[in-house]
Image: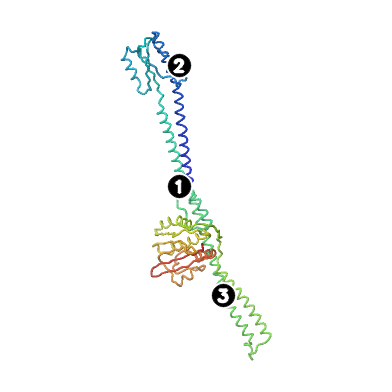
Amino acid sequence: MKRTVSILALITLFFLAVSLIIFPLINKHYDNENGMKIVVINRMIADARKAAADGNAVNIDLDAYRREYEKRAVPDRVDYIDIKDMSASEKSLMADPYASEMIYPIKGTDNSLCGFLCIFYFTNDIRFTQTVAAAALIISYVIIITVVISGYRLMVRPFNTLSEYPEKIAKGRLDEGIPESKSRLFGKYIWGMNMLKDEMSLKDKNINAMEKEKQTLIISIAHGIKTPLSNIKLYAEAIERGIYHDDKKPDEKDAETAAKIKQNVDKVEVLVKEIMDSSAKVDIEHKSVITSFYLKELKEMIKKDYASRMELLHIPFDIVCENNPLLTSDKDGIYKVVSQLLDNAVKYGSGAGISLRMGSQDEDVIISVKNKGNVLSEEECAYVFKSFWRGSNAKNKEGQGIGLYVAKKIAESLGGDIFMKSWASEDTTEVTLIIPI
């Protein structure tokens, strides 16, 4: 928008400059032309007076003047009206109401009035020329401004919106598609980008589902191994103590072998524990990029992406930024966390309303998302940030139970944390993100 305003300002300055040049040129041209006309008129008057003084008929040969002077300087018509014929004079003076007429008296040798020399110019209206020039400039200006504004509305503004979308996809922001458009310029592009978004989103879901199945299998195998290991350890201890001998006395060689079996069982148990611990973890692909930015920049990003979406879903959406501290953190990472919280509020809430509050307190920025409906119990709130865990309100809802886990890991990587609270009596859930400034 700023670039378009700059272009409009440049166009306006250009036309002002042209106006300041062209009108002085028109005036100068007419001044030069009028000077030449005065020369021609003075000569015609002198020739007419000479003819009248000699007693000859006054006859001005315009062709002879045009051969000698520039055609525009020579009158289009010259009439001589004898003083004796006033009716003819009146008739001649009214011959062409659109002509620029000049009348000069012609006197004889005795200084008596002999008649009038009427000189007509049909193309000597400077105001007409200036009006035409002004109209041409104004019409050209209006046409160019209209083309620029239309080009901005039809091409530049939609393209600026679309140019942000590949970046969103690259950063994993796949929840929001581009609104469909009937534009011939961008309709097919929008359709293709939304198709790409859907395909990538589907692949992410499939990958998460496969990851969940893989880790579930690993955990099941690990749990299955634990029971036989415990039994082997018990049998080894029984052999070590000689329980299987009739006299219940341990055999030295059997005890030594049993001790080795127990040591190996301990090693396998350590491996099983490591497998189970690692299976509960999910790789986080997000890479933090630390920059300095104001909190209101984050607010505008969220508002731009979610205000229209909430309006389409008919969900009341309230976003408030109480102050505007300068943060040195990962803006995209924080945005990803907040967008996950908002997406969950849309998915699991009742649609009665979502409120987002942002502000600083001491050395931290506090961002909270509060929504109505489908609250979890306090016991469940303690588990929502574990990988692949889904609450009781997730029935018939798409998802893998990994979003809040990833959000918490990003928050922790930035030195912050996330908490969830629910109030069953108020049917309200609030998730709070704390990030150091």
Circle 3/circle 2 CB separation < 8 Å: no
Label 3 vs 1, first from the N-terminus: 1
Amino acid carrying label 2: it is: Tyr
The tag on residue 65 is 2
- Dot 1 crowding, Cα within 10 Å, few <14, some 14–19, many 20+: few
Which is more foreground, mark 1 or mark 2? 2
Residue 266 image point, x, y percent: 62, 77
- Dot 2 crowding, Cα within 10 Å, few <14, some 14–19, many 20+: some
As measured in the structure, the alpha-carbon distance from the residue carrying label 3 to the one carrying label 2 is: 121 Å
As measured in the structure, the alpha-carbon distance from the residue carrying label 1 to the one carrying label 2 is: 65 Å
Q: Residue at x 54, y 67 (%)?
A: 213
Badge 3 marks a residue whose secondary structure is helix
Instruction: State whether residue 318 is above or below residue 189.
Output: below
Label 3 vs 2, first from the N-terminus: 2
Badge 2 marks a residue whose secondary structure is helix
Q: Residue furthest right?
A: 253
Which sits in the foreground, 308 or 292? 292
Amino acid carrying label 1: it is: Ser
Instruction: State whether residue 267 is above or below residue 71.
Output: below
The answer to whether residue 115 is left or right of residue 333 is left
Amino acid carrying label 3: it is: Gly
The answer to whether residue 240 is left or right of residue 207 is right
Which is more foreground, mark 3 or mark 1? 1
Badge 1 marks a residue whose secondary structure is loop
- Dot 3 crowding, Cα within 10 Å, few <14, some 14–19, many 20+: few
Residue for badge 1: 183
Residue 329 image point, x, y percent: 53, 60
The tag on residue 224 is 3
Which sits in the foreground, 188 or 22? 22
